[in-house]
Image (cartoon, rainbow, N blue to C red):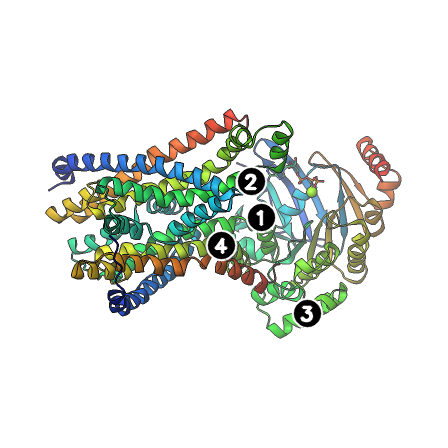
Amino acid sequence: MLDWRWDFTFEIMPRMLWATLNTLMAAGIGYAIAIVLGLVLALAQRTPYRPLTFVVREAVEFIRSTPLVLQIFFVFYVGPQYGVTLSPWVAGMIAIGLHYAAYLSEVYRGGIESVPKGQWEACTALNMSTAQTYFRIIIPQALPLSVAGMGNYLVGIFKDTPMLSVIGVAELMHAANAIGGQHYRYLEPYTIVGVVFLLISLPSAGLIRAFEAWVRRKLGMS
Amino acid sequence: MSYLDFLAEHGGRYIDGTLITAAQFLLAAVLAILLALIAGLMKLSANPIAKGVAVTYIEFFRGTSLLVQLFWLFFVLPLFGITFDKFTTGFIAVGLNLGAYGAELVRGAIQSVPKGQWEASYALSMSPATQMRRIILPQAFVAMLPPWGNLIIELLKGTALVSLIAVSDLMFEARQINGSTYLSAQAFGTALVIYYVFARLLVTPFMRWLERTMRRRMGRA
Amino acid sequence: MEDMSRYPLELTGADVPMVRFMNVTKRYGSLTVLDSLDLDVTEGEMVTIIGPSGSGKTTVLRMLMTLETINGGVIYVDGKPLTHMAKNGVLVPADAKYLRRARSSIGMCFQHFNLFPHMTALQNCMEGPVQVLGLSKKEARARSEELLEMVGMIDKKDQHPSRLSGGQQQRVAIARALAMRPKVMLFDEVTSALDPEVIGEVTNVIRKLVSEHNLTMLMVTHQMGFARDISDRICFFFAGKIEEQGPPDALFGSPQRDRTKQFLSAVKEAD
Ligand SMILES: Nc1ncnc2c1ncn2[C@@H]1O[C@H](COP(=O)(O)OP(=O)(O)OP(=O)(O)O)[C@@H](O)[C@H]1O
Ligand SMILES: [Mg+2]
């Protein structure tokens, strides 16, 4: 039945740890893209220019309701068809960054919409420009309201990075597949992947809550 | 080759794949809902063993990735002498994963039922089971339907991963067609549109309808 | 469409009012909230608007602050159109850029203060001068501290709004509005959200403003005694129109119209 081999475990450990770094890097880069692009998508939906808000709204809905793994394939393979070749990393970061940008734009939108109307009116009364109103008053208040949602999606993007293995990004899952294929042993590599994910994502909920409290304190809002 | 020619040639495979995806979706959804109910109730139970089992299940499946779970079930479970065919492995993995998320929704919704409802049904000398079934769950059900709408979409998206263990679902067919034609935009684009239509034109309207119906039944319309 | 040629591009002459509502109409859907309103406020005047709930008092102030667009007529501030701008010799609705320039002479205090919760009292006051007027931090700080001193909040200048009582928040809000050096100040029920025992600290600040500064002020309040004390003129609004107006002693002492009498006696009973 089950024979867990420790010698094999130790043998593949360096490679798995190296791949863990790649996983963290993929999640980090993807998330950085998503944070910025998500804000763009959220603000674009608030412009008075109707066609733009409509198109962005629909695009966000589309991205959110179709599978990420399919989007990863799409971005990776469609380029070459038109003469643009993207490396697995670039394609993967675009796909996962865009996917989570769509989610984050909803988080931001919720945060912005829960800033009281009086804050906007006070900005008008102080004669602030739209940009000043957003960047100095509204967004700083929307941020703490968005931190919990943003944190959940940070964990989410981390847990979705194994999908990048399908186009050959050398993260954990990819390493586990490769090791499994070479040695015909799947128990140890896949179990290690699971354990690494558990070890990183289990404490995250508490960390997110602590960070949220810290942000609120920092802004003097509690 | 025009897109219409492309569809004429490969449309049949997309339909076959969509049917498999639909089957995976339905089976996984049923499993996820059952597991969510059971684990959600167990997590609220006073029995430490029941509670421990539920917490372990929920944390384990929420803490790791669906893809990791799928591969583990597919490649490692047979080593324990448990073997399912790939179709079954597929929807079990998706159902297990989303059931863990659903369990938290069930727990949250039950806890959001006002305390007065528990006390009122207690005052009517209802048994705990009757209390749960007749008074608490119906109210919790209405409260958790909107977030379940999102979760069910996530479940549909999750089924695309079963293609990676060679279940011939929509995603699988799209990859096959891409591999034989190199028309990636058409091959993957068509599948994206089908998933979108499935989610937005079937699943979401159904969930909205269910929400409305349930609210009306509860006299909250 | 309204014939705009009857409205001058600019008010000229010896006694141009600080604020002029000319034939101003405001509708929400089919509900006409203000109906062809004419109202002048001269420089340095303190005008108080009273009237039953829903009579359009807040709407008057919000239109002047450009928080609401208007459906007819023109508002002038300091002789120049506020809601409109001249284009080819006629007035057309103002665009965002024009509005922003035009409204710079107006400041407003709100019923619910609307302080920025992520900034201290001092930062709240400095925000406009630094960001909008382009003052240096040093100048803005000096100006803000002077005003916080005036409203009696200098001790709490480094507190965030969540640490301040309602009365304290409202005093900071007044300092914040004054820091922009407006020519016209608007007060919309600034004491209505306050506990009775702190109303005095806010009304005292407004009294001080009236006696020491030559500001033009437009105020909505339900405190009749306060209004009578400090106003130059009282306007009684009813159903979107000025039913009666005049000096406080005349309006409170010998109201002419039945609706004014009814309203004043109803208010007195409630007191
Ligand atoms: N955004 C809006 N949409 C629709 N109707 C509105 C809106 N704002 C105000 N109204 C209506 O316009 C009318 C006048 O409102 P306004 O707020 O000016 O009254 P008010 O005299 O300030 O009353 P109160 O003493 O209660 O503050 C009311 O009937 C109100 O319901
Ligand atoms: Mg009002």
Which of the two marks, 1 or 4, is nearer to us in this view? 4
Name the residue rendered at 43%, 46% in the picture: B53
Q: Which residue is mark 4?
A: A148
User: Where is residue A138 drawn, in percent x and y?
Assistant: 53, 56
Number of the label disc, if any, that sits on residue B112: 2
Q: Which residue is mark 1?
A: C83
Kindly tell me whether residue B103 is visible in this rendering. Answer: yes
Which of the two marks, 3 or 1, is nearer to us in this view? 3
Name the residue rendered at 47%, 29% in the picture: B212
Mark 4 on the same chain as mark 3:
no
The amino acid pointed to by label 2 is Ser
The amino acid pointed to by label 4 is Ala
Q: Which residue is mark 3?
A: C143
For residue C201, side relative to residue A178 (left or right) = right
Name the residue rendered at 65%, 29% in the picture: B123
Where does ligand 1 appear, by image quarter? top right
Quarter of the picture holding the C terminus of chain A: bottom right
The amino acid pointed to by label 1 is Thr
User: Where is residue A57 drawn, in percent x and y?
Assistant: 39, 45
* C19 lies above or below C180: above
For residue C184, side relative to residue B147 (left or right) = right
Q: Nearer the viewer, residue C190 or A58?
A: A58
Q: How many angstroms separate mark 1 from mark 4 (CA)?
A: 42 Å
SS under mark 4: helix
